[in-house]
Image (cartoon, rainbow, N blue to C red):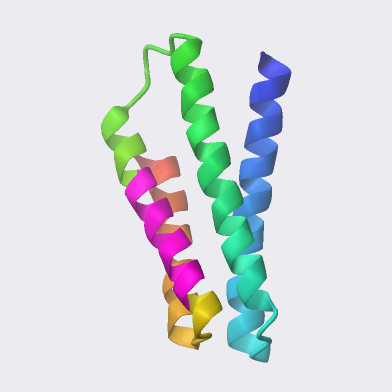
Amino acid sequence: MDIFYSALVFLHMIGLAGIVAGFLMQVITGNAKSTKVLLHSSLLQLVTGLALVGVAEMAGDPEMNHVKVGVKLVIALAVVILGVLNLRKPANRLATAAGVLAIVNIGVAVFW
């Protein structure tokens, strides 16, 4: 189970890197292909985050903070929605908002 959990964490971090990379690619270069990177990475991070919570719940983790998980879920859903909107009509402000929210989500994970 530890290997599965570690693999999920690894994929979760790959998703985070993809969100930040897609955000930077779109803002710096104006590349329209980066919209797919942002969307797929945000979906990867959402799915792996939900799987991580599920694995922690199955393991009976007594330190699970459900308020923190709820806040992170709302932020992750907002990033996915911004990714979808950005795919339909690319705009630097949507990519910037998604990137900033992803970084806020890191802050919630680390400091809460």
Q: Residue at horizontal 48%, vertical 12%?
A: 58
Residue range corresponding to the magenta coloring? 72-85
Q: Residue furthest left?
A: 67
Task: Residue 111: name its quadrant.
Answer: top left
Residue 44 colored magenta?
no
Residue at 51% from the left image edge and 46% from the top image edge: 46
* Figure quadrant of residue 6: top right
Q: Is residue 18 visible?
A: yes
Foreground of the two, 9 or 36? 36
Which residue is pictured at 69% across the width and 38% down the height? 10
Q: Measured from the top left, where is residue 52 in percent x and y?
A: 53, 29
Q: Please determine whether, in this image, residue 30 is positioned above or below residue 102.
A: below
Q: Is residue 98 above or below residue 64?
A: below
Q: Nearer the viewer, residue 67 or 91?
A: 91
- Measured as percent of width and height from the top left, residue 37 is found at 66, 67
Q: Residue 105 placed where, x, y %?
A: 42, 52
User: Does any portion of residue 21 appear in the rendered image?
Assistant: no
Q: Is residue 79 magenta?
A: yes
Residue 104 falls in which quadrant of the image?
bottom left
**Residue at left 43%, top 69%?**
82
Identify the image quadrant of the N terminus.
top right
The residue sitting at the top extreme is 60
Side of 11 relative to 89 (left or right): right
Q: Is residue 39 above or below residue 16?
A: below
What is the chief secondary structure element of the magenta stretch? helix
Most distant residue in the front direction: 88
In the image, residue 77 sits, relative to residue 27, either above or below, namely: above
Asked if residue 51 lies left or right of residue 107, the reply is: right
On the image, the x and y values in percent for residue 15 come to 63, 52
Q: Indicate left or right for 79 with 37 as reference.
A: left
